[in-house]
Amino acid sequence: MRRGIRNYLVFLRRCALIAFVGDARYYLWMGVLTVICLLGLNAYAKQLVHGLITTGMSDEVSWGVYIANFTFLVGVAAAAVMMVIPVYIYDNEELHDLVIFGELLAVAAIIMCLAFVTVDLGRPDRFWHLIPGLGQLNFPASMLSWDVIVLNGYLLLNVHICGYLLYCRYRNRKPSRWFYIPFVFVAIGWAVSIHTVTAFLYVGLGGRPFWNSSIVGPRFLASAFTAGPALIILALQIIRRVTAYRITDKALLTLRSIVQVSMLINVFLLANEVFKEFYSGNLHVASSKYLYLGLHGYHALVPWIWTAIVFNLIAMVLLVLPLSRSLKWLNLTCVLCIVGIWIEKGMGLVIPGFIPTPLGAMAEYRPSLNETLICLGIWAFGLLCYTIFLRMAVPILQGRLTQANEGLPGGRPGPVPLETQLRPQAASSALPPP
Amino acid sequence: MPPLDSFSTQSEPAPAAGMTRRSFLRTSAVLTTGLAALATSLRPLLELDDYTSVERFMQKYYKEMTPDDMARVLKRIENEVQKQYGIRPHVRDLRPMDGVQFVYALNLTRCIGCRKCVHACVAENNQSRNPEIQYIRVLRMPHGSLDIEKAVHDYAPESVPEKGHFYMPVQCQQCKNPPCVKVCPVHATWQETDGITVIDYDWCIGCRYCEAACPYWARHFNFTQPSIPKDRLNPEMAYLGNRPRRQGVMEKCHFCIQRTRAGRYPACVEVCPAGARKFGNVLDPTSEVAYILRTKRVFIQLKEELGTSPRFFYYFDV
């Protein structure tokens, strides 16, 4: 027992230390991210002092880019399942080890999500009112209380799965199936639930016709399964470039087919929605008119949404053509998907729901500089987390950071226990990656 | 670009032989710079004045407070208001009366759109003057239409009423099925037995989900610390009513709880020069509102199709 705890603590310590080691490019990247984080933190400190008046939000448009980014990132987190399903249900070998990278991305995305909701709160000091038992969580009536539960649950599930698998690899042990397979399957269902619940947050509001539509949930999932795997394709290629970790082209192409199908469904559902809104021509079309065409001289979102639609359509065509089998084109496609969906599901979904107001007043929303800095800060923090996770995970998966070489290249100062001193010979011979 | 093996194989920090002088100096330089940068970025927090206190942070939920807790909280609020505004207020925790269900009726034939109700409400309920928060919004509607998307909010003619228009003041409709109560993640807003939906300003976390859920745009958020001129403060206050709010919480019309639960009319009813506003206990058959609901032929419950079932009825002289 004591040895177990000690081993685990050594593991954590070595993981933490390795995050501070890298080449010049690594330090530059982490340094830039840290600076952006601090700028964001500074902006948040200002917001805490002066209140949300430092943002572009108002009583008319009472949610802005914070909630927009939150919505987008819940989708990214949920998309990790699109790697898990092929591996655990269809036994896809190519993706097997890459699942961990997807799940780590989910962890980073959820951390960003939680940060985005926190900065949106008017009274973050009262967060404890949300803790069941301590506060007054309005479960099950409030969809927000569901969101609190599913997001934190999803975070724990993924931290457990990644943490357990990585620790087993570190100790060179075979993971016990009972200790992670059930969680993997729970996580698959849970991933769908986090995005559905987030959609229901909007869908459940009868007073907002733009959101009060049953297609929002399915659209959320379709767009999440487009943007999420697209982001993972890009992340995997970066991992492949800056480390010696082997990632096959076939794995990337498997993800490409997921993005392909999801994008087709996404565009189809979008067409459904646009048709229903405009063809029937009832009074509730005002928000959609504002979004796509502009209304009463207000049209801040029009260029954005058309950019998103054009990006999505180009991406769709590229995905269908064999052209996107070449990685250069695939990368371009992925960028188009991510940007298109970020606009469409972030700003394009959240803002028009408020315009016009329930009393028919027109207003516009433009994020303030301070608000934008906070968003950039959170994104930088998320990337920082993901980089650190990868910095830990890659050497473990390559077998270069293991318990066996614990004493060797100077993990812990001071005397090294006998048992661990005996093994490094064998382990270091296994050093070069496959 | 070749994979960066140098970066990925160099997996462990400084050798175990102990820190060299150079690496020690480097580490401490990095640490100092980091901490200094962190401190600088947090500097604005120094301006954080009276954001919260141990007592306020630990304050219990309204429905869980004992009478002793409540007495202490009321005293504390009185002290805080006195400190800030220089006036000793009288803050009460007024509970709903038995056998009372408040209902509001508004005569659209009579309303002339003068907005006196808006200003009386601001004065009575200690609403922020800068930025402005108002519970009542008077809509100017084109003759013959109830389509709210045709409403004009910022009409400013020489005199009212204007030809070809009618006016529809909208405030919290005190719904029987309030969407705002359903969505609040922390039970900070609820409906009382007399039908008034209230907010515990000390429990609200400021997520603004209720503001998104309200179909009547009745909920308003304190985007910054509200400001009220000291000489304009109304010292007659209720905990769930018009006591001054703080930055980051929601507020809304509560049928002037500090007046109506003490047997008076809401400020908007009292001030209306046209007699368009009627208020009372619908369970009392002799009340004005009971008479109106019994005898008038048509009422409008705003956005009736949403199923919110407002306790606020619009009617005409027919």
Image: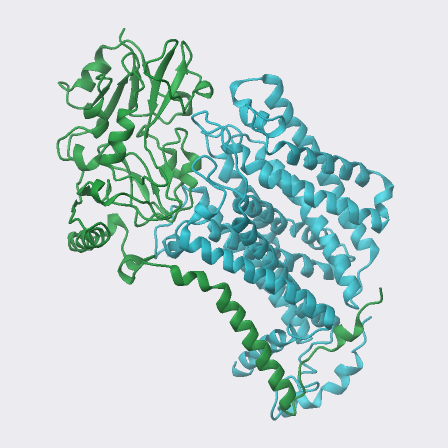
Chain colours: A cyan, B green
- Nearer-the-camera pick, A403 or A73: A73
Residue B127 vs A76, above or below: the answer is above
- Residue at position x 83%, y 55% in the image: A249
- Asked if residue A261 shows in the view, the reply is yes
Frontmost residue, A407 versus B227? B227
Give the quarter of the image for residue A424. bottom right
Q: Position of residue B54 (x, y in %)?
A: 29, 62
Dividing the picture into quadrants, the one containing residue A339 is top right
Q: Residue reaching furthest front?
A: B158
Where residue A203 appears, x then y in whole percent?
Answer: 51, 34
Question: How many marks on residues?
Answer: 0
Q: Position of residue B104 (x, y in %)?
A: 25, 23
Quadrant into which the C terminus of chain A falls: bottom right
Which residue does the image show at 58% across and 17% down from the upper left? Answer: A281
Decide which of A343, B65 is in the foreground and name it: A343
Q: Relative to A169, is A55 on the left or the right?
A: left
Q: Is residue A43 left or right of residue B69?
A: right
**x then y, percent, for residue B220:** 37, 38
From where the camera sits, is residue A131 visible? no
